[in-house]
Image (cartoon, helix red, strand yellow):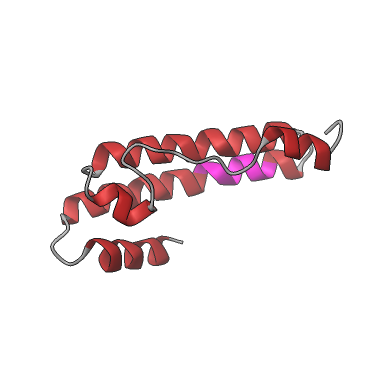
């Protein structure tokens, strides 16, 4: 995942993009990936219901996007994420998850 994200940064933001900013983004992604493993394990072990799992993942993604917006300037954020600077997306709609996994 880090290798792909590094290539995305290089390709989409170009060789003149700040190396220190790129390193901050990679550190953010690494943190998110490591902590997501705990969420995945909790779901796999039955400690989280489907809706709780999706909510935890969405909070994780939101936190990453917010932190990335603090690292990136308003011109770079849309290039990297195809979103307006500071705009965020969620991974799943909790209502759809409830329909797909009723009572979980």
| Residue 78, x across and y down, in percent | 32, 50
In-front residue for pair 98/63: 98
Q: Quadrant of residue 49?
A: top right
Residue at position x 69%, y 33% in the image: 94
Residue 92 versus residue 84: which sits nearer the camera?
Answer: 84
Q: Residue furthest right?
A: 103
Which residue: 44% across, 38% down? 88
Quadrant where the C terminus sits is top right
Specify the principal SS of the magenta part: helix
Q: Which residue range is magenta in the image?
A: 35-41
When the figure is inspected, residue 76 is found, relative to residue 43, above or below; the finding is below
Q: Where is residue 73 in the image (x, y as percent from the top left)?
A: 21, 43
Q: Which residue is drawn at 53% across and 33% down?
A: 59
In percent of width and height, residue 37 lies at: 58, 46
Looking at this view, name the residue that lies furthest to the front: 84
Q: Judge left or right: residue 79 versus residue 65.
A: left
Q: Does the magenta stretch include residue 3?
A: no
Q: In which quarter of the image is residue 91?
A: top right
Q: Residue 43, position in %: x, y?
A: 72, 40
Asked whether residue 37 is drawn in magenta, I would say yes
Q: Is residue 48 left or right of residue 72?
A: right
Q: How many labels does the image show?
A: 0
Q: Is residue 88 rendered to the left or right of residue 85?
A: right
Q: Is residue 29 left or right of residue 52?
A: left
Examine the rendering and report whether any part of residue 50 can be seen: no
Q: Which of the two residues, 11 or 33, is positioned nearer the viewer here?
A: 11
The reply to whether residue 2 is visible in this rendering is yes
């Amino acid at each position: 995942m880090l290798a792909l994200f590094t290539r995305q940064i290089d390709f989409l933001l170009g060789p003149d993009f700040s190396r220190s900013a790129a390193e901050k983004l990679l550190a953010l992604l690494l943190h998110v990936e490591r902590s997501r493993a705990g969420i995945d394990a909790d779901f796999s072990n039955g400690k989280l219901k489907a809706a709780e799992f999706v909510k935890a993942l969405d909070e994780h993604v939101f936190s990453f996007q917010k932190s990335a917006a603090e690292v990136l300037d308003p011109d770079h954020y849309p290039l990297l994420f195809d979103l307006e600077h500071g705009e965020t997306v969620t991974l799943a709609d909790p209502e759809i998850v409830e329909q797909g996994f009723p009572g979980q």
